[in-house]
Every structure is written in C-alpha cells, then in structure tokens.
Amino acid sequence: MTGQPNNVWIPDLLFYENRFQTDLAVVCDAHGKIAEIIQSDRAKGGVRLRNRAVLPGLINAHSHAFQRVIRGRTEHRSANQTDSFWTWRELMYRAANRLSPDDVYDASRMAFLEMALTGITTVGEFHYIHNDFNGRPYDDPNLLAKQVVRAANDVGLRIALLRVAYARAGYEKETDPLQARFIEPPDAYLENVNGLALDLKKSVGLAWAGVAPHSVRAVPLDYLKRVAEFASRNNFPIHMHVAEQPAEVKACIEEYGRSPVALLETEGLLNSRFTAVHAIHVSAKAIKAFGSSGAGVCACPTTERNLGDGVVPVDSYFETGALVSLGTDSQIQIDLLEDARELEYHLRLQRTQRNVLAPVDDTGESALAERLFQCATSNGARSLGFDGGSLQPGAAADFFSLDLGDPSIAGAGAADLLSCVVFSSSRAAVKDVFVAGKRIVEEGRHPAQEEAIGAFANLQKRLWV
Ligand SMILES: [Zn+2]
C-alpha cells in the first residue's frame, strides 16, 4: 500500500470504470492526485466511509457567482410589462453595479460554499465585472477576478476563471451605463487576461485562466477574432454565450447576415477548446457544426427554465457527438444533478416520451444515467481544459460521498444506484467532499460555513434594505 494512512478512503461502493464496485479503496498521493485504486483488504490504516458511496466530483462549467445575491429577488411581475430574460437582466445589472470588491468576495464565497456542499469540486467562473463603480479599471485591473479566485480557494474548490471580454451593448445599440463595469478595449483585455493567467500559475493547478468573449452581441467580430487567436496560441479554453435568446440571433443576422453559430463556424472559431453556453435557438445545420468542429455545448437547465430561455436540443447534440457539459449559471439553484436530470426531463415534456437521451444501442439499467452523469463530470472537466471528472490513478483526487441511508437513495444497490443518484438524490445525501485529496466538507458541513453565511447575510441586508 502507498500513501499516508489518512489519505486512503474505503467506501461501501466506489464509482470506478463507469460502475459502482464494492471492496475498493482510493489512495491519494501527497500531490492531490489519485495514486491508485486498490482492493480494500490491502488498505490497512485507511479510513472507512461507512454506508457511503464515493463518486467523482461534479464539474460546474458555467457560473456567475455574484448572481447569488439576486436569488429570490426577481420572481415577481414587473409593473406594466411582460417579464422576460431582458427584464431579469436589468435587475441583475443593478445588483452588479452595487457590489464592492469585498461584496464580490462574500457573494462568491457563498455561491462556492453551496457548490461544495452539493458535491461540486470544480467551477468554471464566467467573470465579467472588472471595473470600479465609475467604469474605470481598478489599480489592479484583475482585482475582482482575484477576489473570486480567493473565494474559491478559501472554500477549497478548483476554479477556471474564464475572464470575460465585453465591448458594447449590441449592434447599433446606444451605450448602456449599467454595462460600464464590464467593458474593456481589446488591448487592455488581452494584457489583463495574460497577467491573470501568469498570476494563477502559482496556484499549482487549483486555479487557471480561460477566455470568454461574452456573446456575439457584446463582442464585435474583430475583437472576437483577437481573443480566439490568443486562446489558440495559449491553448486556453474559450467559452461564450451563444443563442440563449431569439433576439440575439435576430440581431446577429442583421449585423452579419448569419446566425451566431454560422458566424462562428464560417469564421473558423469553433474547435475542441470552444464551449457554447446555452446554444438553444439553433438550426439543425448549426448543430451539425458542433459535431464536425469538436466544439462543446454547456447547458444550464435550472437557469434556462427560470429565465424562460427555452430548451437545449441535447438529443440532437448527442447525435452529432458534441460534448455536453452543465452549469449552474444564475445560481437560482445550485444542484448540478438537478441540471443533469432536467436535460432529460425538458425533452420528455416536449416530446411526451421517456428516456429520450438514452443511447439507442445500449439498454442497460443505468446507460441513460451514465450519460447524464458524464455531462456533470468528465465533460465539464474537458470543457474547462482540466484533466478530471473520473476516478482513476493519476487523476485529480476530487470526489464526494453520498449517504446510502439517505431517504432519497435508500435501498439502491450497485446496479440502480447511479440512476437513483441522477434522477432522485437529494443534496442532503452529500456527506464528504474532497478536492486534491483534502476533505473540504465532512458530514455535510464545511468548516467556514457559519462565517461565510453570516457575511453573506450581512451583505444581503445592506443590498436590499
Ligand atoms: Zn451565463
């Protein structure tokens, strides 16, 4: 046996090689990786995780942590108008314009704490508040990005800081003062993202940078191409909101004579490092472009249903072989397994069918659950440019345990447990969470929980009096 005794964990069931297995132990090395998976009778001195199943940590590929502050604040009808994504966005912008650097930290830490408590071990943070209240860069133009990274570090999550490029309100649109904190010219943006990436190298794999041109609405083509070139040169992940709302598609056709996906495809911007977030309002031809280019899609169903965005046609994306990942996006709920089940459930409601996303060539008990669980784990890791999302020697030691006695999954065995996890498990079943081999949540609690919640409650009081 290798590894320190307290770095060997022995659950009742371990999700290894795509199925739950008994009598196995996870051995973590001193560098936060899995050294080996061994037979539990060889794991002398290891820690027994009694009545627990251990699974790879969930990967949240799309988050705006600060939006946690508007949870519960937008669920009412505005006077004299039909509510939509756009009326919600106005309320969200108003909150974004009131957050100090310390507030950004407190809001982010709250969101990340909740993520950790639900089994999320890595977050892709699509970060776009850069400037001060007057729309000018801080002395350190990465100040707010670093506040977000610090919040993730303090909770113990891994983070890909996807630094957002933002230039304008939209095609032929007047400047919106509520977007002043987001906007940077391309030279400044590229210098800042480069500076941030260098800074994050010190974090030994716990934090890294990616690029995120916000959308075709907010970033004109010449700027977008510069960001894409930078990403190619540096092998960075590139994430972008694509076709979340029909109005964005319409404006893109007016400006370029092409839909957003057609624009990205014809300009050669789709590749295996590219993830289109949402990608809802797309044609069949556009979906094929994902398969042929290797680009991925990040669906955020709990947010998409809350904002009235529409349904991601995941069945068609699966048919093309596109990589589908998941995100908690607006943080209206933080529960990535709920996003996983919604991928399927939205299509069931639309089609009045069941098991829409089950692979046609595999009728095994958990083939559908496996597919959805992959979206919540390894697909998310690939989208963020991170080698994780499964438990195997050499991989990051990021995993979580579920209480097999929790009422939501009680009675499940090796064969049906994954389907129970994906379709039925409650967040309350999550008991231990490990990142880089370190236990950051124990018995369903995080050591900084009271402090983080207290600071966040104070922030909310100040923001909403
Ligand atoms: Zn988003």
Image: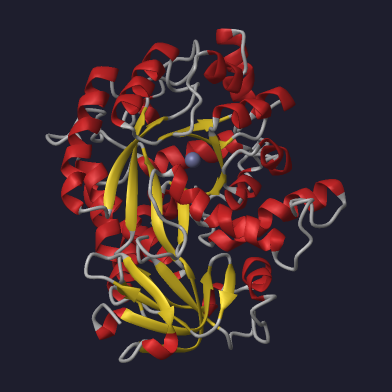
Say whether residue 327 is visible.
no
- Across and down, in percent, residue 211 comes to 35, 33
Tell me the quarter of the image containing the N terminus.
Answer: bottom left
Is 432 positioned to the left or the right of 357 in the image? Answer: left
- Across and down, in percent, residue 368 comes to 71, 59
Q: Residue furthest left?
A: 139
Location of residue 282 by image quarter: top right
Location of residue 133 by image quarter: top left
- Foreground of the two, 48 or 185: 48
User: Is 340 placed above or below 22 here?
Assistant: above
Is 49 positioned to the left or the right of 362 in the image? Answer: left
- Across and down, in percent, residue 288 comes to 67, 27
- Across and down, in percent, residue 241 comes to 51, 33
User: Is 236 placed above or below 19 here?
Assistant: above
Say whether residue 382 is visible.
yes
Colouring = secondary structure
Q: Residue furthest right?
A: 352
Q: For the image shown, how many numbered marks are present on the structure?
A: 0
- Foreground of the two, 10 or 142: 10
Is 118 positioned to the left or the right of 30 in the image? Answer: right
Residue positioned 48% across, 14% down in the render: 173
Residue positioned 78% across, 52% down in the render: 361
Residue positioned 14% across, 36% down in the render: 140
- Foreground of the two, 387 or 168: 387
User: Is 96 placed above or below 180 here?
Assistant: below
Tell me the quarter of the image containing the C terminus.
Answer: bottom left
